Image (tube, helix red, strand yellow):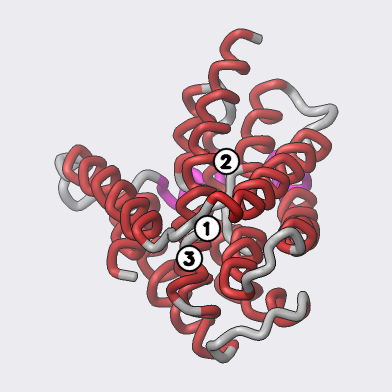
Amino acid sequence: MITLAVLVFCTGSSVTFADISSVRGASRRMVLVLAATTAILPLLAWLASRLVSEPALRGGVLAAGVAPVEVASVALTGLAGGEVGVAAGLLITSTLLTVFLAGPILRLLGAHSAMSQVGLLSTLAFVVALPLIAGCALRTLDPFGGRERSLVGILGIASLLMLLWEVASELRLHASDGLIAAALLAYLAGAAVLGWLLALGMPSQRRTAVILPTAMRDFAVAAGIAASAFGIAAAAPLGIYGVMVLVFGAVAVQTAKRG
């Protein structure tokens, strides 16, 4: 949980509160994107989880459906020439929605979690919401004149690698458990299609800023949700999902550049 909090803080420190307020022109479409992803992605994850028989691992797949926008999608949006402000706005807003809605949505989908809704809410508040707000405040106030950004960047990469290792180390898959990878791949494909549909009719730069955040959900936060709600074993599938998401993002950037 500490590693996740550090990663979220580093993510928040890359965005100012002004970056969020500057995307008012896209606010209507952003509301649509947030509403659609909040309602549809958990359903896609639930459908994908039907492929998994182990209850704990099924909970890990479900957790991906209530996770917020992947941290790396903002940077990848910039590399692809997309509107970073829109992607950042979706990241922060979806994170706050996750804090308040993850527990109720999991219960609505019939998940019998090991933690109460209040417990999950408090965990997400302290591990996700507060570090994110603190990071944004640091970047907005800029008390160090930007001198800390390189250090924060290194810390963010280190915490991301550490978290990926922590999650992957819990993975105990056998050849017969390929259905877990298939379930996560199906969920990722469904999320990518949803992002493409939501981006129809948009300018190319904004289209990228919608597709990547919609398709790429934060495996680190998902792992935290899974561990808190279903036990540490439930976080195991998120290591696979994290690799899939990052590969998808890299391929999407290359495709956007060629287009």
Instruction: Tell me how far mark 1 sits from mark 3, CA to CA.
Output: 6 Å
| Mark 1 and mark 3 residues within 8 Å of each other at the beta carbon | yes
Q: At 78% across and 42% down in the image, what residue appears?
A: 194
Q: Which residue is mark 2?
A: 87
**Is residue 18 shown left or right of residue 32?**
left
Quarter location, residue 4: bottom left
**Closer to the camera in the image, 47 or 38:** 47
Q: Which mark is residue 235?
A: 3
Number of other residues with Cα within 10 Å of mark 3, as a class: few under 14, some 14 to 19, many 20 or more: many
Q: Amino acid at mark 1?
A: Pro
Number of other residues with Cα within 10 Å of mark 2, as a class: few under 14, some 14 to 19, many 20 or more: many
Say if 3 sits above or below 81 in the image.
below
Mark 2 element type: helix
Mark 1 or 2, which is nearer the eye?
A: 1
Q: Which residue is mark 1?
A: 237
Residue 141: in sight, yes or no?
no
Instruction: Tell me how far mark 3 sits from mark 2, CA to CA.
Output: 26 Å
Percent x, y of residue 206 = 67, 30
Q: Amino acid at mark 3?
A: Ala
Q: Amino acid at mark 2?
A: Ala
Quarter location, residue 208: top right
